[in-house]
Image: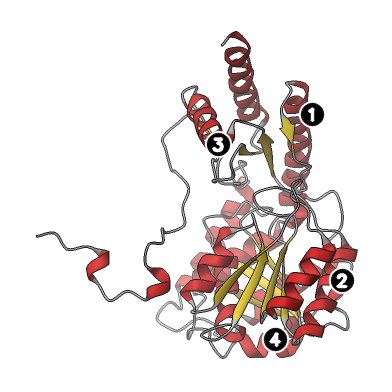
Amino acid sequence: MSFGIDDLPVRDELRGKSPYGAPQLDVPVRLNTNENPYPLPDALVERIAERVREAARDLNRYPDRDAVALRTALAGYLTDTGAHEVSLANVWAANGSNEVIQQLLQTFGGPGRTALGFEPSYSMHSLIARSTGTGWISGPRDDDFTIDVAAAEAAIAAHRPDVVFITTPNNPTGTAVPRETVLALYEAAQAAKPSMVVLDEAYVEFSHGASLLPLLEGRPHLVVSRTMSKAFGAAGLRLGYLAAHPAVVDAVQLVRLPYHLSAVTQATALAALEHTDTLLGYVEQLKSERDRLVTELRTLGYDVVESDANFVQFGRFDGAAGSHAAWQRILDRGVLVRDNGIPGWLRVSAGTPQENDAFLDAVRELKKEEHSA
């Protein structure tokens, strides 16, 4: 007799769920996970090696539990790029932005509490909510994937969530949320409870507009979440961070695991921050390539959602079956994009010019097949 997960005493809210993940296939061009396609420059690799070598001498000791040097450097980066001054007391760091979100939900969510997000959006928000015993509420989006303020305010008033997620630029659609919308939803959340509002800015360095970091001023229930996985080209590092009122930073430390950030992680992140200018130069290249993808896809006749991220959502295909069939035909040509379950749409990450050329060649062939069918 076989024994599987259904035979274990798994919590009810986890039964029937699937773990998060995108296909990892061995193909020539992989444009499905929004990675930065540019390898780290040699000078940064050497600096990482130096810093890790220094950290290795003390690996018999626990790392800095509060990651003071790293948080100070992150605060400096945010102050320099975000048009708003933050300090060590405003910043917290963890193993990827997913752990940041987990710690926020462990602190402000949990059994008997709820979180609300506007879907489709980053699916880990709902998955982490459920894993922390937080009830999940799916808020509305319009057909063009923007947030209707009146409908969103009504949802917040009706459900009175403890945590509200706003993702800008939004994954998987790439749409940015206007400052006025964020302000309106923050006020709605405070009128309802008050509630914590988490502004997920994982892709903000790729945006046409500015970060909404300055909105932290005078808003102690607002949190801005960031990552080094995208703009810093450090997906393998697993380093996320948040900026918020010092009281929020104090609160999340109630649930953090002891010495949760390794000495090696801290050393590597510090080295990357020393090369910010070079890495943000790659971001500018990717923004240009992202805009090229938008233009070329529209020229080919595809519908394309306006993107402020390092990826583009395009369609429209004939429902879920049509988008999956298109995904497979693109894959047959050696290019992996993302079918993330939004009927009629696919998502492609901006790659190097050569990778993007391969993708565009694949979709041109796809269009020829459609016209000849």
- Marks 1/2 in contact by CB < 8 Å: the verdict is no
Task: Report how far apart the C-alphas of labels 4 and 3 lie in the structure.
Answer: 37 Å
Q: Secondary structure at mark 2?
A: helix
- Marks 3/1 in contact by CB < 8 Å: the verdict is no
Task: Report how far apart the C-alphas of labels 3 and 2 lie in the structure.
Answer: 34 Å
Task: Report how far apart the C-alphas of labels 4 and 1 lie in the structure.
Answer: 42 Å
Badge 2 local density, few (<14 within 10 Å), some, or many (20+)? few
Residue displayed at 51% across by 34% down? 321
Q: Earlier in the sequence, mark 4 or mark 1?
A: 4
Q: Secondary structure at mark 4?
A: helix
> Where in the figure is residue 5, as x and y percent of width and height?
27, 65
Task: Report how far apart the C-alphas of labels 3 and 1 lie in the structure.
Answer: 18 Å
Camera-nearest residue between 147 and 224: 147
> Where in the figure is residue 136, as x and y percent of width and height?
57, 71
Q: Earlier in the sequence, mark 4 or mark 3?
A: 4
Residue extending farthest to the top is 372
Residue at label 1? 295
- Marks 4/3 in contact by CB < 8 Å: the verdict is no
Camera-nearest residue between 220 and 235: 220
Circle on res. 183: 2
Badge 3 local density, few (<14 within 10 Å), some, or many (20+)? many
